[in-house]
Each structure stands twice: as C-alpha cells, then as structure tokens.
Amino acid sequence: MQLWAEVAEQDGAASQSAMLFLVQPSMDVEQEVIRAYESLRLPVHLYLAAVLGDTSEAEDICQEVFLRLFVYCCGRGMVAPERVRSWVFRVGHNLAIDRIRTRKFRRELDGDDPLPELLQLPDAGLTPEEAVLEGERLQAVQRRLAQLSSQERHCLYLRAEGFRYREIAEILGITRASVAEFLRRALRKLMRDNDA
Amino acid sequence: MRNLFPFADWQGSWHPREDDLLLYIDGELPARRHARIGAHLKECWACRVKVEKLESTIAAFMDYRSRASAGLGGSTANDAFRLRMRALARHEGSRQSMREFVARARRLAGGATRRVPAMAAAGVLAVALVALAWKYFAPAPVSAGELLANATLAESARANDASVVLHRSLLLEKRRSGDAKPVERRRIDVWHAGNSGMTVRRLYDESGHLLAAEWRRRDGSAEILSPQMRPRLEARTESPLAMLNRPEDLWRLDPSAASFVQLAGDASGAKVARQGENFRVSLGPEHATGHFLKAVLTIRRNGLRATGIDLRLAEPAAPPQPEVRTQEVVYDYSIAEDSYQQEPLETAQAGVFAPDASLMLPEQSQEPVVTPDLQVETTWLLDGIGATLGGEITVSMGFDGRLHVEGIVQNEARKQEILTALKPVRSNPAVQIDILSYSQALRRAVAATHTTAGATPGVSSGNSNLSAQADISEFLASQTPPPPESELRERVMRFSAEISANSSNAARHAWVLKHLAEMASPGSGENLSAETRRQYLSMVAVHAREVEQSTRRLKLELDPIFFAGLPPPGESPPPPTELSPVIDRLLDAALRNDKAIQSAFGISMGVESPVSIRTAEFRESVLETEELACWIEKQAGGECVEPGQNTKASP
Ligand SMILES: [Zn+2]
C-alpha cells in the first residue's frame, strides 16, 4: 500500500481524490481523529476566527483541518498525540492564509468592503451597568487589538494557546527570534497607557 | 564609547531589556540569564513594575479572548463534522478489493516488498506494469472505484515524469441532445511539462483562431487569458462540478480519471463496461445534480489513459421574452482525444509554455504601465512559491515607473524556480526583474569592494594559515571538563556551522535592509501614508535587529577563540547621521564579514586560500556591523542597547 499512498501524495491536488481510494483507514484512526476534533476544535476555531475575523469561515476551515488530519493519518497511522496539536494549528493557519489570499483577490475583483478583522463579542448576560463597564473595558482591548499587525496577532493568539516560542515559530514558519519580537510588540501595543 | 568591562551591571546601573523581561516571564531564557534576571527582579522595584504591567496586559487580553470564545462552537458543528468524516471513510468496499488486486499486480511486477519512490523511474515502471496487468488480467467484473484509482495513478505517474513533455490535442463538440450536427466545435491543445508541473491549455475555434488559454500550476492554481476579458486567476483547482455550471468553461475540464472522480464524488456507484480496447465508466441519473444529467468517461485499457469524456447537461435556454418562463435545453458535450504524444523534454518547442501575445489585452502591450492588478499578480505569483516570506523577494515601484522585482535567493535552483513562477509577467515591459543567487550577489559585492576600496581589511591574508576549525577544536579541548574525544569532532562541526549560519544570516538581512532603503529613500518618505510608514519602519527595525542579533551571537562565539589576545578595540567610529549611507556601510561590512567567515571555514566556493579571522581588523568589522545595525534599529523605532553596554564575555 505504501507505494500507492506515496504516489498519490506526490501528486498533490490531482490525486487527493485518489488518496481516498488508496488508503486504508482503520477504525482506530477515524476514532482518534474524532477525539482530536472534539478536544481541539474550540481552540483551533478561536485561533482561526482571530486570523480570519469571521467565525463561520473559521468553523469551516476548522473542520477541513481535521478532515485533512484524517486523510493524512490514513496512510501512515495516527500522528503522535503530542504532535497533533501543533499539526492542526499549522495546517489551519496555512489554510486560513490561503483563504485570506483568495478573499483579497476576490475583493480586488469585486470591490467588496474589507472584512472586519476582529472577533465579535457575544452578550454575556450582565446587568446593564455591568455591561456598560465590561463593554468599555473589552472594547478598549479590542481597539488596541486592532492596532496589531496580522503576524503580531497570530503570535499572540498562539501564545495564549500555551504554545512555546519554538512551536509558534514552527507553526507560522518564522524564526523564534521573530516570534519573540512580534510578541513584544503585540504586548506593547496592548498596554493600557498606550491609548493615545 | 565601548565599555572595557564585559559586565555592565558591575556599575550597578544595569536593567534587563523589556524583551528580556517578556522572555523571562515566558520562561524562554537560558537558565543562566533567567537566574540573573530573577535575582535582579528581587532587587529592583522599577523592573518589577514593568513585569507587573506585562502580566496585567496579558490578563486583560486573556479575559477578552475568553469572552470572545464563549460565542463560538455551535453544537451542530460536531454533527456536521462527523457526517463529513463518515463520507470520507465510506470507500471501504472498493478499497478492500483494490488492495487484493494491487498485491497481485505487484507480485507480478516482482516488487512485492520494495518501497518505490513515486518520482523515480522504478515507480513509473511499477505503475506501468500495473496498468499493463489491467489490460490482461483485469478481474472479471471490474469495479469503478478500482479502475479509476488505478487510472488516476497511471495519470499521475505520466504527469510526474520529469523527462518528458506531454502533448495532447482534444476535440470538443456541443450538440443539442439527439441532434447529429454539432452546434459548436472547438479544438483544445494541451501541453504538460513533468519537471515544472505546468499545464497550458489553449482553446481554438474551427478556423484555428486562439480564443483563450489557461496556465495551470502544479499546486492547482491557474491563470486564464482571453481577449474578451481581463486575466482571471484562480488560487485552487475548481471542482469540475462547479465548472458544469458554466458550460463556457468546459474546455478547461480535463478528460481524466482524477477529474471524473471529483465529478462523481462517490464513484462506487458508477458502472463500468468493457468495449473493445476501452473501458467506459458511466454516472447515471442517480448522480445527477443541478444541470448535470450524465457523464461517461472512456479509458483505454492499454496504459489506462482516459481518452474522452461525454457529458449531458441541462442549460437554461435564453428566453425570447423576459416574461416567458425559462426553459431548459439539454446539450451533449463530448471532449475526445485526437492525438497524444510524449516528447523528450529537450526537443519540445520552447515557446509552447509562453503566454500568447494575441491574448494580451491591448493596453498591456503598449506603454509600460504598472496597474494595481499587475502588482497584485506579481506578488501573487511569488507568494505561490513562498518567495514573499521573510522578504526573500521584494516587489516595489521604481522611480522609472516600472515594477521592480528584486531579491537575493539561496541558490541557483531557487532562482530558476522563481523566474519560472514569474513567467506570466516576465514578458511585460513594465516589470523589471533582478534576482541574484546568493553566491552571485556575494561575488558582485566583493568585486565592487575590491575595485573601490582595494583590499578589504578582514580578508587580507594574515600571518596565520591555520584552519579555523583547528582553532575551535583546540579551544573546545581546553575547556574544563574537556569534551570526550569521540564528541569533539561533532562539536567542532556544530560550532562552525553555527558561526557560519549567524554570519550569513546577518548578511542576508543586511541585503533586505538595502532593498528596503532603495524602496523608500528619505525623499519619498513623505509620500507614504502614516500606516505604511509605520509598517515600513517596523520592517526596517525587524531586519536591523536580525543583523544586530546575529552579529552579536557571532561576536560572542568568535570572541573567546579568535579575538582572545588581541589588543583592546579602539575608539568607535563617529555616530552616523543618515539612514541610507549607513545601510550601505552595514551591507558592506556584513558581506565582508561573511566572506571572511565562509572563507576561513572553508565553506566559500571561491578558490582563495583560507584567511585568518584572528585579526584586529576583522574584529573591528564585526563590532562595526553590530553598532550600525543597532543604530538603524533605533532609528526605526526599535529598542537596542548599545553593543558595548550589553556585552558578555562568553556565550
Ligand atoms: Zn531593574
């Protein structure tokens, strides 16, 4: 089976479909992927929403990521558990960036309005007074978040997931030093006395 | 003024830098520095307040983030995912029988246990043998899934054969269902290069006029040119199913097993019939969706190559009057192979992959005008092969009104890859491409320094002809405790590699700075919007910081081995005043250092004898690089502590 899986893999897009025929998913892999999905979907969804600024698009990509994990694992068995987390974030990040790229392109052609790049805040069931105070506080954070470059935002959200700098560097395909720099700038911009 | 004492906190005025504080609370510092800052925080209120501030900023963000995440994750997502997952895993049956067949075919091919790399000739051979086996030994009722899977493999083996160019000519006919006479006839000419993965598809009318063409890259992205419309780009292969909704795009559908599988979705329901030398795989009414009614794929038994596809589509008829209800007309399309050739790469006509002049929009062939489209497209092409990452290639407007695509890339192969990707815009007179491989750039720069300034200080052959590795080896062996003999060689290699990497990293980022400087010289700075200016400066700061940090690491690595015993460094050069010449100086210095390092470690490609880096001049040059980078970083709004105040004695 190895040969076939390899041929299919080399060929990329055209043989994605071939992969479906050629690989032999065991029930285990399917269960493992579903388990991984259930435990990681919220963090991945949140990160992708922060990257894309759109929660439903993020959900779509989030599912795509785990389906890819399934296809990926079919040929070679489940990814080691400790690698799954950074695998799904890396693949998710790349898919999201692809999506943004085509979106930008479509926007260029259609002249749509740019999409908001921030998460929407839900109602938290607070009393009106609380809501006002809370709202102001959160909006201040949101306002400062809007100042971040996309890379700064990516690093920040990944760090919030508990990734180490080395892992963030791997997910984003940048150096560890850049991760440190982006994080430093992100926090700098988020500091309260930074609202001019 | 450089500090003679390596430990600046000796004077009691040392505080950790802000980024070190963040690294500290994130636990990202090496143990010694961590301990040192921890000790300092015990003593210093001022720094503790800074840490507090970082922590409360983090807390505010985490609070915001958890509020935002409360809005995510509808319960339906889980079910939707499980459904998609099941659909994906449902091909169990066809796979099962396939496995048995493959095992048989591979025994036949004599490679039962061998693992064959896909691109290797052996892999192609194995696939060819399987394809041959299909001709003679195909199991009696053939399942569509198996057949399509094997045909897909045979297709990809042919498409990945780097030594040939595939050329096939197709006829496209459109008829009203039931009519014999076609209402439309087209010829499609397809070229595919196995080495680059590029596929060019040209559409001609009956009298041979070129109507449109498509360039599709290996990753599935495509560009479509046609005189009737502006160039169209697609980032991903469109599913054939989506193509069916635009029958005018059907010429782009490849008669292949791969696209048929995509069309079918779940191909296990397709029927297979043998007909002479061919298999015919058909999707009946149960697969019909939207306008799509029926499809038949013809696969030659010999070689398992798809040679044609027939489609039946219901298209809305153009109503004669607006109030008349739209009716559907059923059309039959047939795309059939007319000729098929494999040509050796060397003899294939060079021009077939180039864009056709007749498809270019008229305005593009006149004045060199840089449209926003062109700028985006160029960036998009580069982005497709990851060349915009980390500033490998920059795309900028030149003063000559042309779009400049410039960069220094790792090696010649990468350069060729980038030039190939840029093919669609290369012939555009508004695009100026200047890409050098790293060694080319180095040679060019070194040649320039030699002609202008004579011999370079660090590079002049010193009195020592000792190899740098020997010096490192000696140094490491003198450490207490000395490393075990067995590890010494490995450690020397690793240490050398680190030195070399730091040095070339500094040079690479100095190049990027140079390009940034050229992109927006001080004069044009006022034209930038505040936002762009901010972005620009932050890029400068990041790259300057990379130069500074790499050089600092380099210095710390070299210091105990090569600079020990040299007289103390002299006065710093006077502080610079203007950004652009400083960047020039920085680039000169970084390239000079790198050349010396690569030469001393025997890594350079030149034939010169190894030079000594155990000289005061070379150290001067390293220190200058660090200082200049630091100064640039500060000019761009970054934070950098003067090298002299932060130096430590050993790594
Ligand atoms: Zn302090």
Image: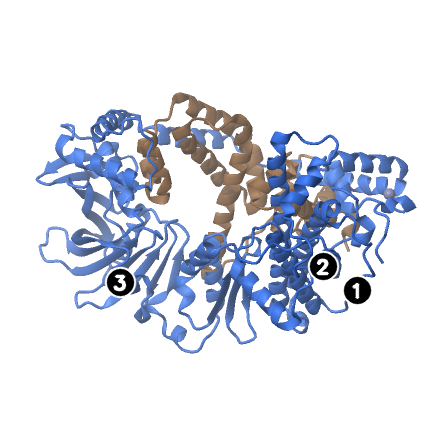
- Asked whether the residues under marks 1 and 3 belong to the same chain, the reply is yes
Q: Is residue B425 left or right of residue B557?
A: left
Q: Which residue is mark 1?
A: B573
Q: Which residue is mark 2?
A: B621
- Residue B86 lies, with reference to residue B475, above or below; the image says above
Type of amino acid at the residue the image marks with label 3:
Gln
Query: Residue under mark 3: which chain is it in?
Result: B
Q: Is residue B406 left or right of residue B291?
A: right
- Point out the image quarter for the N terminus of chain A: top left
Q: Disc number at residue B349? A: 3
Question: What colour do you see for chain B?
Answer: blue
Q: In the depicted view, which residue is nearer to us: B95 or B437? A: B437
Residue at screen point 50% across, 29% down:
A37
Type of amino acid at the residue the image marks with label 2:
Ser
- Check the image and name the residue furthest to the bottom: B367
Q: What whole-number distance in Å separates the C-alpha atoms at marks 1 and 3?
A: 59 Å
Residue B348, percent from left and from top: 26, 59
**Sooner in the amino-acid sequence: mark 3 or mark 2:** 3
Tell which chain the image draws in brown. A
Which quadrant would residue A130 be assigned to in this image? top right
